[in-house]
Amino acid sequence: MTKFVYFCITKIIHSFCKEAKCSKNEGGRKQGREEANLETTRNLLEQGIDLNVIMKATNLTKKQIRQIK
């Protein structure tokens, strides 16, 4: 994986996190980040991105990613 690809994926994840609707309490923010991370993972899987790249970009395990499929 090139640094550029990793950088692009990281930017995508951060943009989803910023756009996620979160309530003012920490629980709401955490839930919003988790939902954005799952949505990003789904999108990356649909694009055929390698599991190892998704693991690095989202900090999810292979087991967690496979459950999303």
Image: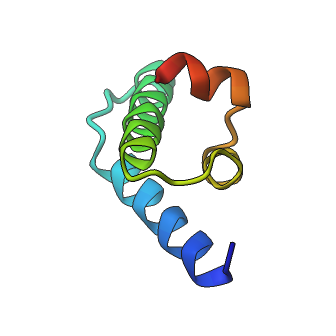
Q: Quadrant of residue 7?
A: bottom right
27 w.r.t. 36: above or below: above
Residue 17 place in picture, x, y as percent: 40, 47
Quarter of the image that includes the N terminus: bottom right
Nearer-the-camera pick, 28 or 61: 61
Nearer-the-camera pick, 1 or 6: 1
Residue at image position (69%, 42%) is: 59
Residue 40 place in picture, x, y as percent: 41, 44
Residue at image position (64%, 44%) is: 51
Residue at image position (30%, 40%) is: 20
Q: Among all residues in the image, which is located at the extreme front?
A: 48
Residue at image position (60%, 52%) is: 50
Residue 11 place in picture, x, y as percent: 46, 68
Residue 16 in the figure: left or right of residue 1: left
Residue 26 place in picture, x, y as percent: 50, 26
Residue 26 in the figure: left or right of residue 35: right
49 w.r.t. 4: above or below: above
Residue 39 in the figure: left or right of residue 56: left
Count of residue discs: 0
The colour mode here is rainbow
Residue 42 in the figure: left or right of residue 64: left
